[in-house]
C-alpha cells in the first residue's frame, strides 16, 4: 500500500479533473478541536435515488419498523475511567447540543441524535471514550472526512459536519458530527424484509459507487460491513425519532420491496488506509 501522507493527497486533489462537478466544498476549512463551527452544518442532500430525502414522505411510501438501541444495553463498566461519557436524554452537552435519542454504541463511541442550538438542525454525534489510546483513530477519521469535504460530498458517503471536544464529568471526549441517517443494512436484513431483486442490484450499485469514489482518491475503506452501510431518511422520519425519544422502535418511510423503490445508501464509519 502507498504510504503517502495527507499533504500529498491534497496536492493530488488539486490536479483532479475527473469530478469537477463535485468540488462545491473546495473552500471548506479544515476543522480543529477548538473551532466547532468552522465547518458548515448543512441539511442532508436530496438525491435522485431518494425521492423523499429532505422532504415529507409520500403517503404511498411504505414504512418499516426497526428496534431501537437501548441506553441501558451499554455495559456499566464502559463508563469508568477512560470510558464513555455518561449522558442522558434531554441533556445539554458542549454548550451547543441538546440530546434527543440514544442511537447506539461501538467499541469506542456512543452515537446520539441531537439538535444543534445554533441553527436548530438535527445531527448525529459520535462521542468517543476519553481514553487517549483512541485519539489517533478519531483524528484519522477527521482527517479523512475533511479531505473528502475538500473534494466535494458524494451522495453515497455519510456527510461530515465537523469536529469538537466536550468535557463531561471532568473528562475530555472527542466528538464527530454527522448528518442523521436511518437504519443500517444489518438492521434491515434482520427485519426479514423481502427485497425485490432490483433493490438488491441498486444497493450493490450504490455501494460500488462509494467504493469507487474513495479508491479514486487512493484510499481503501478497511471495514466495509452491513453495520457500516446506512440508509438515508427523510426529515419527517428524523423528527419522529426526536419526538419518540423513548420509543422501542423507529419507523422509517423506506420502500425496499418494489422494482422501482427509491432509496439512498451511504457508506459510514470510514476506517481507512492509504
Image (cartoon, helix red, strand yellow):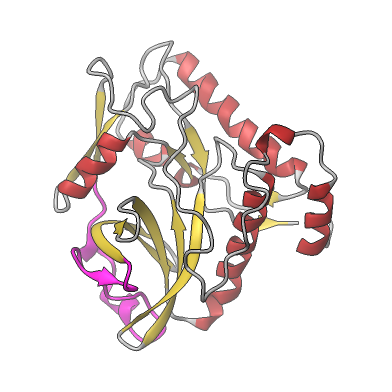
Q: Is residue 163 magenta?
A: no
* Residue 269 seen in the figure: yes
Q: Where is residue 40? Give x, y as percent.
A: 50, 54
Viewer-proximal residue among 58 and 121: 121
Q: Is residue 83 magenta?
A: yes
Identity of the residue drawn at 76% across and 41% down: 216
Viewer-proximal residue among 175 and 38: 38
Q: Is residue 139 left or right of residue 196?
A: right
Q: Is residue 34 above or below residue 233?
A: below
Quadrant into which the N terminus falls: bottom right
Q: Where is residue 133? Give x, y as percent.
A: 55, 80
Residue numbers of the magenta segment: 68-96
Identity of the residue drawn at 33% across and 75% down: 85
Q: Is residue 260 left or right of residue 16?
A: left
* Residue 1 seen in the figure: no
Quadrant into which the C terminus falls: bottom right
Q: Where is residue 66? Give x, y as percent.
A: 26, 39
Examine the residues drawn in magenta and state their main secondary structure.
loop
Res. 193 image quadrant: top left
Report the label total: 0
Identity of the residue drawn at 58% across and 53% down: 270
Q: Is residue 29 above or below residue 242?
A: below
Identity of the residue drawn at 84% across and 57% down: 2
Q: Is residue 124 above or below residue 216?
A: below
Q: Where is residue 140? Give x, y as percent.
A: 63, 65
Amino acid at each position: 500500500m502507498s504510504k503517502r501522507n495527507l499533504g500529498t493527497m491534497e496536492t493530488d486533489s488539486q490536479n483532479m479533473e475527473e469530478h469537477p462537478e463535485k468540488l462545491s466544498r473546495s473552500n471548506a476549512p479544515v476543522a480543529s478541536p477548538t473551532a466547532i463551527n468552522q465547518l458548515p452544518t448543512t441539511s442532508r442532500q436530496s438525491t435522485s435515488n431518494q425521492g423523499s430525502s429532505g422532504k415529507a414522505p409520500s403517503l404511498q411510501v411504505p414504512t418499516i419498523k426497526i428496534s431501537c438501541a437501548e441506553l441501558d444495553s451499554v455495559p456499566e463498566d464502559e463508563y469508568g475511567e477512560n470510558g464513555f461519557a455518561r449522558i442522558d436524554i434531554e441533556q445539554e452537552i458542549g454548550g451547543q447540543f441538546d440530546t434527543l435519542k440514544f442511537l447506539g454504541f461501538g467499541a469506542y463511541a456512543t452515537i446520539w441524535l441531537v439538535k444543534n442550538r445554533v441553527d436548530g438542525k438535527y445531527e448525529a454525534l459520535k462521542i468517543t471514550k476519553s481514553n487517549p489510546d483512541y485519539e489517533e483513530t478519531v483524528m484519522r477519521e477527521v482527517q479523512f472526512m475533511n479531505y473528502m469535504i475538500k473534494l466535494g460530498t458524494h451522495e453515497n458517503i455519510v456527510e461530515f459536519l465537523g469536529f469538537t471536544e466536550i468535557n463531561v464529568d471532568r473528562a475530555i471526549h472527542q466528538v464527530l458530527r454527522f448528518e442523521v441517517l436511518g437504519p443500517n443494512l444489518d438492521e434491515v436484513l434482520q427485519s426479514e424484509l423481502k427485497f425485490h431483486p432490483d433493490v438488491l442490484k441498486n444497493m450493490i450499485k450504490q455501494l460500488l459507487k462509494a467504493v469507487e469514489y474513495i479508491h479514486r482518491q487512493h484510499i481503501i475503506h478497511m471495514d466495509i460491513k452491513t453495520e457500516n452501510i446506512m440508509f438515508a431518511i427523510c426529515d419527517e422520519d428524523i423528527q419522529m425519532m426526536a419526538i419518540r425519544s423513548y420509543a422501542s422502535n423507529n419507523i422509517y418511510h423506506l420502500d425496499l420491496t418494489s422494482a422501482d423503490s427509491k432509496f439512498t445508501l451511504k457508506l459510514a464509519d470510514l476506517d481507512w488506509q492509504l
